[in-house]
Each structure stands twice: as C-alpha cells, then as structure tokens.
Amino acid sequence: MAQPQYPLWVGDSPMSFVTHNGVVYYTNGTVIGYIKNGQGYNFDTPTAKYKSAPPPGQIIGYYNGALYICQKNVLWVTDTLAMNQVDMRNGYKQFPADITMFAPVDDGIFISTTEKVYWLGGLNPDKMYWREIYDKPVIKGAWTYVDSRLFGKRKLDFMQGKTIVMYTNGGLCWGTNNGIFGNISARKYRGPSGMPRGAAIFVRGSINKAIIAFP
C-alpha cells in the first residue's frame, strides 16, 4: 500500500490537476502524484511485466475510467480502472507536435497540439481513432465547458452532451460529441492570434457567458 509522500522539488512549471472520486491527480512535467483524504502520494512502481507508473507530463486528465497524461507530444493512457499503471508497449498515442489541450466530452476527446486540433473518438482507449478537425491550434488554456443550450435550438439535435468553447488562432470555436466542430467568429470577428497562453471560464447569470482572457 502506498505511503503518504510529498515531492521535495516540483520545479517551476504550472501544475495540471484533475479530480475523480474525491482523489486529486496532479502533474507538471517534473512530478506526478495524487492527493487522497488530504494526504499526498506517489504512484507505486507496478510489478507486472511491461507495466510502469504513469510518467509526469504537462497536462493530466480523466476520461472513461483512465488517466491521460500529455507528455510533450505523447498521450499516455493508464490501464482502465487501474490508474496507477501504463502499458509501455501500447499505452500511448503519439501526435505530430506537443499537446496543449486535453478536453474530453461524452464520447471522445478534443486534443490540441501547438499546430492543430484533433478529435480522438471512442470510449475504449485500445479502439480509439483520431482525425484532424482544424488546421489551427487552440491557444493554451483558452477553453472551457459551456451549456450547449446557449447555441440555440438549431444546434440542440447534436449538442445534447458536453460542449466546449475554445479560442484558436483562427478565432472562437466550439466542439461537442461525435467530434462535431465549428467556428463561431470566422465571418464576424477575428481576435488575437499567436498568443502564448490564455484562460477561460463559463459564468452563469442573467446573461450566461464564456469569458476568455489573455495576458
């Protein structure tokens, strides 16, 4: 059984977090671990052949029973329901450039690299397929989940589940289940491009809005 441990050095890179069943998993490219019941832990080294503890990366996320760790341009996937280990033989997917966004919806994951946006479709990591959906990247950090009802009745037929809004180098875009993707602002407004990073949040109120900010 893992004993409480805290890293002595975490580096100066931003920390990425994801929470599942009351456990907070974190990584920042230098360290990786989890916090449970207020105690910090490292991942134990698995004893099974070809298995390894999850590696640190710049982003960590959760989807359908597994942790996903973005380590530069490699997307590592832990074994389903065994989030303490990855299979070194086939527990990863490699993208052409470094990953900057991991945004799961109900039936797949939107991935942005420093170059393009991709759709990783399916529920089972072993059977997932991926395809390019946009030739411009999401600005790092500039995305958030929103209420799909904001997009009007015409889009509700295919926007019943999770929906994200993301700011790309091509403008403000949205994505939802089945990898459906659209550009909201292409013909109306073109904001800044090439920004190194941003932040986004969805605010409910008398006027629901997604707020996206840049430094």
Image (cartoon, rainbow, N blue to C red):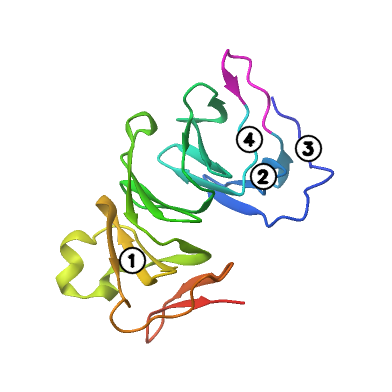
Q: Which residue occupies the extreme right position in the image? A: 8
Indicate which disc residue 14 carries: none
| Distance Cα–Cα, label 1 vs label 3 | 40 Å
Q: Are marks 2 and 4 in contact (CB under 8 Å)?
A: no
| Distance Cα–Cα, label 4 vs label 3 | 17 Å
Picture quadrant of residue 190: bottom left
Q: Amino acid at mark 3?
A: Gln
Q: Quadrant of the C terminus?
A: bottom right
Q: Amino acid at mark 4?
A: Pro
Which residue bears the numbered disc 1? 174
Looking at the picture, tell me which residue is in the foreground, 121 or 32.
121
| Distance Cα–Cα, label 4 vs label 1 | 30 Å
Between label 4 and label 3, give the one nearer the viewer: 4
Magenta stretch, residue numbers: 43-52
Indicate which disc residue 5 carries: 3
In what element is the residue under mark 4? loop
Place of residue 157 in the rendered image (x, y in percent of width and height, measured from the top left):
15, 62
In what element is the residue under mark 3? loop
Picture quadrant of residue 168: bottom left
Q: Amino acid at mark 2?
A: Asn
Which residue bears the numbered disc 4? 55
Q: Amino acid at mark 1?
A: Trp
Task: Answer with mark 1 or mark 3, whichever residue precedes in sequence.
Answer: 3
Q: Which residue occupies the extreme bottom position in the image? A: 206
* For residue 54, side relative to residue 21 (left or right): right
In what element is the residue under mark 2? loop
